[in-house]
Amino acid sequence: MEPYLFTGVILPERAQLSLQREFGFTHLLIGASGTVKMSIVLNQVAIWVETDHDWDIFDLRNVVKNFIQDQLAMLGYIKGYVYDFEVTRVLSQSRSIDYVFGIDIPCISERGPEADLPVAMEKLSKKMSGPTGVLISRCFKDLASSMKYADDTGFYCYRAIESLRHHCASAHGLSEAEKPRQWGKFREVSGCSEGDIRFIKSAADPLRHGEIANASSINRERILKITWDIVDGYINCI
């Protein structure tokens, strides 16, 4: 079987990078193995993945992104550089695959009708004002990271919710209260269940303590949907 071919780009393109690497891998959750051959020439990326497993292309894309981000993280450690990576396309003629990846997370982008961006962003900007507005801002940044870094989705989703819990506690004079009381008030305001918060926490805990946790596309979708429901419930009530 021919290898999967992924293409992409290293950002920013003005800081040119060329690098060649080859290594084997075993996906910890799925158990599938393979070989990755990476070629970066002037920030243009080609990655060949040889594997016998019939992959979901989004799961394999996340594997590829992790490998490239690992290389860029090592480079950042050695050189003090900050690079990012975007996967744009995957091809495998023998599997009839030729797919260009979008920038959206479908389970989030399909949640409702298209918003009037200026109106929606103005409403959110007002909620980010004041001394505790930084907590709302941090929540949104963590949600963005939860979409960007697949393996760390649970970590960022739970931290986003924790920021809102602090915001809620401050708004209701509970900043010095015990955590159970703070969480209780947050659930009351947001309308979420204790079970939903515990589910996100269970996805985050291994990552928060430096352990390994991998989310399949199906489980990751559930984490994201529940998190967005919780955040929507709170943001719409403040």
Image: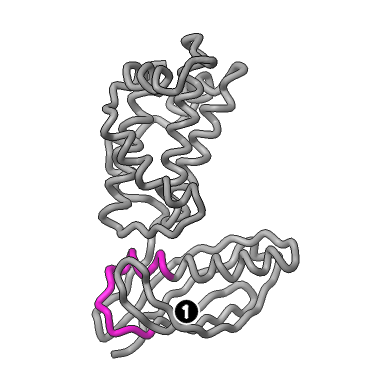
Left or right of 118? Residue 26 is left
Q: Quadrant of residue 227?
A: top left
Which coloring applies here? Answer: one colour
Estimate the x, y position of residue 102 in percent, counting from the top left. Answer: 39, 58
Q: How many marks?
A: 1
Residue 61 lies in the magenta-colored region: yes
**Residue that numbered label 1 is attached to:** 47
Comparing 212 with 170, the one in front is 212
Q: Residue at x 34, y 57 (%)?
A: 215
**Secondary structure under badge 1?**
strand
Is 167 above or below relative to 212? above
Q: Quadrant of residue 115?
A: top left
Q: Residue at x 32, y 66 (%)?
A: 29
Estimate the x, y position of residue 85 in percent, counting from the top left. Answer: 54, 63
Residue lying farthest to the bottom in this orientation = 1
Estimate the x, y position of residue 23 in percent, counting from the top left. Answer: 50, 83
Is 150 above or below relative to 131? below
State which quarter of the image contains the N terminus: bottom left
Estimate the x, y position of residue 138 in percent, counting from the top left. Answer: 54, 34
Q: Residue at x 47, y 38 (%)?
A: 159
Comparing 7 with 142, the one in front is 142
Label 1: few (<14), some or many (≥20) within 10 Å? many
Q: Residue at x 26, y 27 (%)?
A: 193
Is 25 above or below relative to 206? below
Residue 232 lies in the magenta-colored region: no
Query: What type is the residue that disc 1 sits on?
Result: Ile
State which quarter of the image contains the C terminus: top left
Q: Which residues are magenta?
A: 50-63
